[in-house]
Amino acid sequence: MNPNMRNEKLRGLFEELGFKNVKTIISSGNVVFESPQTDVPALEAKLEAAFPEKLGFTSTTIIRSQQQIQDLVDKRPFGDREHSKKTSLNVTFLKNEPKDLPKTPFTPEGRDYLFVDMSDRAICSVVDTTLNKTPDLMAWLEKRYGREITTRTWKTVERILNTF
């Protein structure tokens, strides 16, 4: 809802910082871009420094390459499950490598969601939305892995891949 997170402002900032072929995907901070720089932590730091200065907000930046997104989609972590009104398929991207990942499939005690894959700093989860809500999943993930995470639906991940 922050007006400075709108697609045109994000695109403008990325272009001002020298990134090429900048595209935004839905209004949730997803940006596809090209850069000759391959040092991901340096790119993330550059963007994190620019947000408050240029757009007036702070945000954790998590970058994944086109190949990493392609590998995740090719892996088919959700099998034949489909995103629907009753089932939410989610991917949570972690900025840093977690110290303890349970073996999947995994359901946290007392929870109604299922983790189907945890690898390459991506956690794939299935939420039965008739029993539980995604915010509960987000709270559980933040408590366990910290605030430097971001979650997207599987549909959004596929959409991002199709934007490259």
Image (cartoon, rainbow, N blue to C red):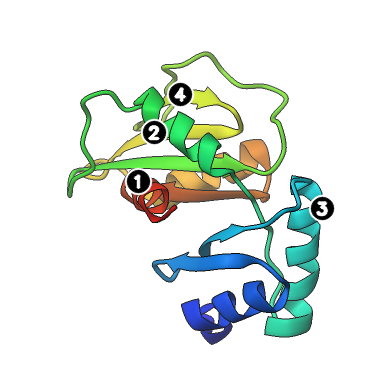
Q: Give the CA distance from mark 1 to mark 3.
A: 26 Å
Q: Earlier in the sequence, mark 3 or mark 2?
A: 3
Residue 106 placed where, x, y %?
44, 19
Q: Earlier in the sequence, mark 3 or mark 4?
A: 3
Look at the picture and state if 10 lies above or below 148. below
Where residue 158 is drawn, which disc sits there?
Answer: 1
Q: Earlier in the sequence, mark 4 or mark 1?
A: 4
Question: Does dot 3 land on a helix, a strand or a loop?
Answer: helix
Residue 74 placed where, x, y %?
38, 27
Q: Give the CA distance from mark 2 to mark 4.
A: 12 Å
Q: Is residue 32 left or right of residue 57?
A: left
Q: Give the CA distance from mark 4 to mark 1.
A: 17 Å
Q: Nearer the viewer, residue 48 or 107?
A: 48
Where residue 117 is drawn, which disc sits there?
Answer: 4
Residue type pointed to by label 2: Val
Mark 2 or mark 4, whichever is nearer to me: 2
Residue 158 placed where, x, y %?
35, 46
Q: Name which residue lies at 59% across and 28% down.
A: 120
Q: Give the CA distance from mark 3 to mark 2.
A: 26 Å
The answer to whether marks 1 and 2 mark residues whose Cβ atoms lie closer than 8 Å is: yes
The answer to whether marks 3 and 2 mark residues whose Cβ atoms lie closer than 8 Å is: no
Q: Nearer the viewer, residue 21 or 155?
A: 21
Look at the picture and state if 46 lies above or below 14. above
Where residue 42 is drawn, which disc sits there?
Answer: 3
Q: Is residue 56 left or right of residue 33?
A: right
Residue 34 placed where, x, y %?
61, 57
Circle 2 Cα neighbour tier, 10 Å, few/some/many (<14 / 14–19 / ≥20): some
Number of marks in the image? 4
Where residue 73 is drawn, which disc sits there?
Answer: 2
Q: Name which residue lies at 38% across and 49% down.
A: 134
Residue type pointed to by label 4: Asp
Q: Nearer the viewer, residue 77 or 161?
A: 161
